[in-house]
Amino acid sequence: MPSTSWSRVSPLRSPALLLVALIAATTSIAAHAQTFTTLVNFSGANGAYPAYGSLVQGINADLYGTTAYGGTFDGSHGTVFAITPQGQLTTLYSFRGNRDLPEAGLIVAPDGLLYGTTSDGGDGFGTIFRITPSGILTTLYNFGGTAGEYPYGALVQSFNGMLYGSTNTGAGSYGTVFRINPSGTLTTLHAFDLTDGDNPIAGLVQATNGMLYGTTQQGGAYGDGTIYAMSPGGAFATLCNFNGADGRWPYGALIQGADGNLYGTTWFGGASDEGTVFKITPAGSLTILHNFDYTDGAYPSSTLVQGTDGYLYGTTQNGGAIGYGTIFQITPTGTLATLHSFEDTDGAYPQGGLVQGTDGSFYGTTTYYGGPDNHGTVFRLSMGLGPFAKTLPTFGKVGNRITILGTDLTGATSVTFNGTPAPFTILSPTAITATVPVGATAGQIRVTTPSGTLTSNVTFKIL
């Protein structure tokens, strides 16, 4: 494995101490039929070491992601790849700069274009890029100086169409939050001063109230990291200061659950200092849902995802039956079940989170091991959940055209926004465009197809 500053894998405990891990784990979560499949073993030439970004699903139903290393230019610069749900991988782009390190995941804009960051490269301090699904890449911004340095997290597209993200250092060395438009004009909105946070690793999430929420890895009142809220214009407030007992070093981005609360993980801290899952209200009331104890996982560094069954799903970087990490499921009230313990042969040390594809299955990556070259994997976990609809974006004004992703859409006969019919155009078996109709209210989008009705997993917000 190449020498790198971004690896967050901790020394393994003796496997002999972990033999009873799964036997000892108990949960009241109802069992579902589940199937784990390794889809791709990275070889180096097609990418290596996918870091802590989650995959995203594009308009053509393919999944897109990045690897921090590998590719065709001496194997040390990283790639952008696409993979079908069946496992056919295509390398879209091989970086060739100075240690580009595309560590974060991508986001998909409503027009199908993908946006991402590299934590190095460019002028040496990281970049923001845009790439087409066919692999044409444009660098939008090169970081350095007061604008911040080293963006590790993914971007998020706001209700106003702008992209938001964070840098790990710069502007006083404690990191920044920035806004950039799709043409590449960047504005620094906040510079951390240690008292309000330090070294943000993760990206942000925009809640339905319009506020952006994020985390810093360190800093704050106790030095263990913070949770903050920020308006799209830059008004900033610290919501939570981690103190070790309730977690420390949050690495993954927050998500907003269907109940309106925000959910996330800390890499360390909690009862065993092996990480936590937490819930926080938009007003700042924090609840610890689970303390990892290594037998059920340890050191979660990824973003959670809420499945169509209402459960939250995530990964831990270490722990489990062998010590190579886990996939877990947890209820919004804190009941956790370990779904899979990695065994080296099927991958190890998952730093990235999961994404639920519109076919109902979950997809993710492991950072190391798996396959003959030990460069990481892409996997699928089926929990027996059915297909659903996903919108790009999850918000819009009356008259806006949005894209709806799904399966078997060719013969679709109707689209409704919380019960209000909408005009639509079928693009392909996996994509529809629809116009937000007059009279639409916030709620679920439903698409009627010959195979049944697909319902969106996230409430669509009317602006």
Image: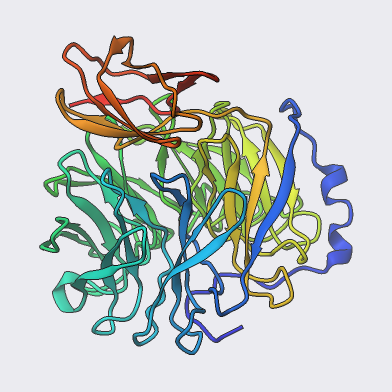
Q: Quadrant of residue 42?
A: bottom right
| Residue sitting farthest toward the front | 411
In percent of the image, x 78 and y 61: which residue is there? Answer: 343
Q: Position of residue 318 (x, y in %)?
A: 67, 61
Q: How is the image coloured?
A: rainbow
In percent of the image, x 51 and y 47: which residue is there? Answer: 246
Number of on-image labels: 0
Instruction: In this rendered view, identify the residue nearer to me: 199 or 454.
Output: 454
The vertical placement of 31 against 267, above or below, is above
In percent of the image, x 50 and y 40: which residue is there? Answer: 305
Quick check: 103 left or right of 272? left
The vertical placement of 404 against 327, above or below, is above
Quick check: 33 left or right of 93? right
Instruction: In this rendered view, identify the residue nearer to me: 449 or 321.
Output: 449
Q: Position of residue 30 (x, y in %)?
A: 73, 25
Residue 296 appears in the rendering: no
Q: Quadrant of residue 160?
A: top left
Instruction: In this rendered view, identify the residue nearer to me: 268 or 423.
Output: 423
Instruction: In this rendered view, identify the residue nearer to me: 280 or 307.
Output: 307
The vertical placement of 95 against 89, above or below, is below
Locate the C terminus by quadrant. top left
Q: Position of residue 58 (x, y in %)?
A: 40, 47
Q: Quadrant of residue 26?
A: top right
Q: Position of residue 144 (x, y in %)?
A: 20, 78
Locate the N terminus by quadrant. bottom right
In percent of the image, x 54 and y 48: which residue is there? Answer: 354
Residue 322 appears in the rendering: yes
